[in-house]
Amino acid sequence: MIAAGTRRVAARGAHHAIVLLAALLTACGMLPQREPPPPPSAPETLPPPPAAPTPPPAAAPSQDGPPSAAEIPPDLASVPDAVPKVEPKSATGNPQSYSVDGGKYQVLANAQGYKERGLASWYGKKFHGKRTSSGEPYDMFKMTAAHKTLPIPSYVRVTNLDTKRSIIVRVNDRGPFHEGRIIDLSYTAALKLGILGNGSSQVEVEALDPTKPDDAQAVLAAATKPPTPQAVQSAMTKLLPAAVAPPTDAAAIDPHALVAAAPAAAIVPFVDGDNASGLVVSPAQQYTYLQAGLFSDPINAVTMREQLRELGIANIVLKDDARGSATVHRVLIGPFSELTALYEMRKHLIDQHVATTPVAE
């Protein structure tokens, strides 16, 4: 009985608990629901920071260019042309075909009959001493060239179509891989062809066959024929300062007349390519040199020195001067211990169509 009563009490308690729980759940369902939290706001957009200034492009060694005046051999203009001879193909540089920068090139089986017109360019100090396609080191002071498809080695005659001047070079490298350019000349070859200042020039490239007597004789004649005095003078005239014309009367070369007529400071203008500047000369200074030229490119100074030597002038000095951030290269004749000797030399050079300016140094 006790147990049965206990079960009834427990059952009633459980019933009350269930009723209470249902009431609580109903009450909860009647409570107002919370609104969902707002979505997170987007972060504030700030203006982008200003772009950093673009640094100026680095010069060397990424850019090619001429050697310094100190590196240029004194007899560079007299370097002989390459002399064709029968040679086996080099072990490297002669695949049947190759690809560069998306272009595919077929190497010719031989050079016979090759002749083409297009642009010639040159390469210099950046590649000096580096390995060429033939495996030989590049020497910018030799008469060599790079070509895209001729067998290595080959010999070609390159003719400047503007001046009709010709040189003979040995092809031992590949290039140039620029549209329209058909040959890349060494620095010295470009000097002798007269295209250094142009960057590129229109030329005709013709392959030479050393086994053919006609080609061999023409090559020998070109390699041994010295330049005529007229050709030397013509080349020098192109290098002379345009604003310094040779005097036409005797009074102009008289030292006393020149000093008396000079202002307190005379500007001696010169023209080098598209750039013009000047050199200040005081008449109170003692003139000891004749200035024959002033150039921004050292090879022009070296070329003028060699051309003056062709005229029998021996006492030639190359002097580098700073002009702001640039360096200019002066061609001086002297020194002269006497003013009379200086003006006698100046008159002699005028007779050779070479204009000079008296300077202190």
Image (tube, grey):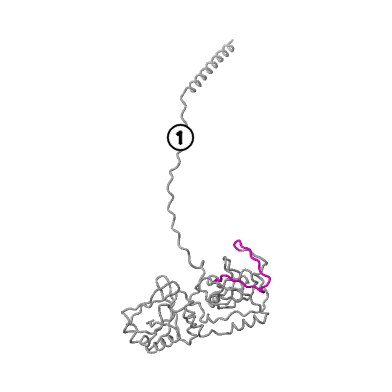
The N terminus lies in which quarter of the figure?
A: top right
Specify whether 243 is left or right of 233: left
Q: For residue 119: magenta?
A: yes
- Examine the image and state in which quarter residue 117 appears: bottom right
Bounds of the magenta span?
100-123
Quadrant of the image occupied by residue 263: bottom left
- For image coordinates 38% across by 75% down, the residue present is 278
Q: Is residue 106 above or below residue 272?
A: above
Q: Quadrant of residue 42?
A: top left
Q: Nearer the viewer, residue 25 or 29?
A: 29
Q: Residue at x 64, y 77 (%)?
A: 208
- Looking at the picture, how far across and down is residue 165, in whole percent? 55, 78
**332 w.r.t. 2: above or below:** below
How many marks overall?
A: 1
> Is residue 319 in view?
no
Say whether residue 265 is visible.
Answer: yes
Q: Residue 317: image x %, image y %?
A: 44, 82
